């Protein structure tokens, strides 16, 4: 009981911290590796002991834990480098370049069962462009996104026999999102014009009223921009929030004395709509003889049908020699089931300040059409001495985002990572593990002529105590 109380307090603090962190991931929106042991080995994790990160990798590997109980406390640094270059060649650098992500895990073995608790950031994406960059459209509009998904996970692993382990988890999932997105007049008209709609669509009573207003304006009236804005600036959560659940099942099988196989299935999440009450959308028209006319509508925003995808993975670990561990995983992430489109609704408050738009609604969709993603991970660990282990790996993932629909506010395009790290045993109970990953630059041009380049340098460090 004395141990559980501080663990409970630690978990509560980490839950709060994780809710605060936007996560910038690199296998689509997934991290390239969870926990520094796995991350240093290219993200491999499905068939060998990699600590309590097992709860988000393959929970069956908890059964391989050598000690009776284990506590892991970790923090990750994610360093994205993102540039969006306009069709005319003007660059805009994202100022979102360093983010910190804590994680926590505890597991204990009782007979043939291993169970515990973990809190991990799943992943996300985002960036921020200065209001005076070209992304501000010349009207001082900040453009930024922060998308984060985290999990509190309860695992149970069962040692069926000396060779075979089965496991499952129950995951409480939360998601947060901030969005400040400026759309040019041409982009907005593409959404609302039924004969166009190349990159998305918009409908609802606000669109109808907007069309009526445009008809009443003098000939030559144009739209400067439309601006969606839900961002609370909080260090603890996004303006739009949703909650739900998911789960995993996994196995580990010792095929031979030196060969272990592993497999896992992560279910798709079941999240509520991400709700952002009390925010706004705005638009501005350029009216001949009258100048520019802007209006901001107050109301409630919802992001609908945002989910994290299912994942299926298989891995092998080979103890090639007493000092050498080789590992390989292959995973399929089913993005196409959850990232066909970005669906957002706005309901204008029924107030006089909203004018003709009071009480009306807008349904907007941005096409995404992400493909399913194959991830191949390779890793090696070499035990230099009883106190020191060196690790390295490579991670390759297909880019799931079609170039046509790539949005510079949602960059998730990195394909190749080179990883390295080490483990240091302080004594029989304590250890430190470190990983560094280099995500190599990918530069692609979308259907609007915007070129987006994205690279990353990420690191994780973990302190472990064994009981």
Image (cartoon, rainbow, N blue to C red):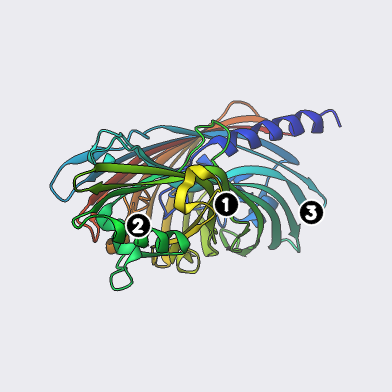
Question: Badge 2 is on which residue?
Answer: 213
Find numbered disc 2 in the image and state the secondary structure of the residue it sits on. Answer: helix
Q: Nearer the viewer, mark 3 or mark 2?
A: 2
Task: List x then y, in percent, for residue 68.
Answer: 76, 41
User: Residue 462's image quarter?
Assistant: top right
Find numbered disc 1 in the image and state the secondary structure of the residue it sits on. Answer: strand
Relative to 12, 233 lies left or right:
left
Sooner in the amino-acid sequence: mark 3 or mark 2: 3
Relative to 414, 221 lies left or right:
left
Q: Nearer the viewer, mark 1 or mark 2?
A: 2
Q: Depth check: 224 or 434 in front?
A: 224
Q: How far is mark 3 from mark 2, CA to CA?
A: 67 Å
Which residue does the image show at 23% across and 55% down from the upper left?
Answer: 218
Question: Badge 3 is on which residue?
Answer: 113
Sooner in the amino-acid sequence: mark 3 or mark 1: 3
Sooner in the amino-acid sequence: mark 1 or mark 2: 2
Task: List x then y, in percent, for residue 5.
Answer: 81, 30
Find numbered disc 3 in the image and state the secondary structure of the residue it sits on. Answer: strand
CA neighbours of label 3 inside 10 A, class few (<14), some (14 to 19), many (20+)? some
Viewer can see residue 136: yes
Question: Badge 1 is on which residue?
Answer: 274
């Amino acid at each position: 009981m004395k141990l559980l109380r501080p663990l409970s307090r630690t978990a509560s603090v980490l839950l709060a911290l994780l809710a605060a962190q936007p996560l910038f991931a690199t296998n689509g929106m997934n991290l390239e590796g969870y926990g520094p042991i796995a991350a240093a080995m290219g993200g491999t994790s499905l068939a060998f002991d990699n600590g309590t990160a097992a709860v988000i990798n393959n929970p069956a590997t908890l059964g391989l834990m050598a000690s009776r109980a284990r506590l892991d406390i970790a923090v990750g640094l994610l360093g994205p480098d993102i540039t969006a270059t306009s069709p005319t060649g003007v660059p805009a650098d994202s100022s979102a370049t360093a983010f910190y992500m804590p994680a926590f895990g505890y597991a204990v073995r009782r007979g043939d069962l291993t169970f515990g608790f973990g809190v991990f950031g799943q992943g996300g994406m985002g960036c921020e462009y200065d209001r005076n960059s070209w992304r501000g459209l010349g009207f001082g509009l900040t453009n930024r996104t922060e998308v984060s998904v985290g999990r509190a996970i309860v695992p149970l692993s069962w040692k069926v026999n000396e060779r075979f382990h089965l496991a499952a988890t129950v995951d409480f999932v939360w998601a947060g999102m901030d969005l400040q997105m400026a759309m040019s007049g041409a982009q907005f008209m593409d959404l609302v014009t039924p004969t166009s709609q190349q990159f998305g669509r918009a409908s609802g009573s606000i669109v109808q009223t907007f069309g009526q207003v445009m008809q009443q304006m003098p000939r030559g009236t144009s739209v400067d921009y439309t601006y969606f804005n839900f961002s609370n600036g909080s260090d603890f959560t996004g303006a739009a929030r949703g909650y739900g659940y998911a789960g995993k099942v996994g196995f580990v099988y010792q095929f031979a004395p030196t060969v272990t196989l592993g497999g896992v299935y992560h279910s798709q999440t079941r999240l509520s709509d991400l709700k952002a009450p009390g925010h706004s959308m705005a638009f501005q028209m350029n009216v001949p003889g009258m100048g520019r006319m802007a209006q901001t509508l107050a109301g409630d925003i919802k992001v609908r049908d945002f989910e994290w995808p299912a994942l299926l993975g298989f891995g092998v670990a080979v103890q090639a020699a007493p000092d050498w561990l080789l590992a390989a995983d292959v995973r399929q992430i089913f993005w196409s089931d959850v990232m066909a489109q970005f669906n957002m609704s706005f309901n204008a408050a029924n107030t006089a300040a909203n004018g003709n738009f009071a009480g009306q609604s807008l349904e907007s969709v941005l096409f995404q059409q992400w493909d399913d993603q194959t991830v191949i991970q390779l890793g090696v660990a070499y035990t230099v001495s009883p106190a020191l282990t060196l690790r390295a790996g490579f991670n390759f993932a297909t880019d799931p985002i079609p170039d046509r629909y790539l949005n510079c506010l949602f960059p998730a395009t990195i394909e190749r990572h080179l990883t390295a790290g080490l483990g240091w045993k302080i004594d029989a109970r304590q250890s430190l593990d470190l990983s560094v990953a280099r995500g190599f630059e990918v530069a692609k041009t979308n259907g609007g002529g915007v070129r987006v380049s994205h690279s990353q340098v990420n690191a994780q460090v973990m302190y472990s105590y064994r009981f």
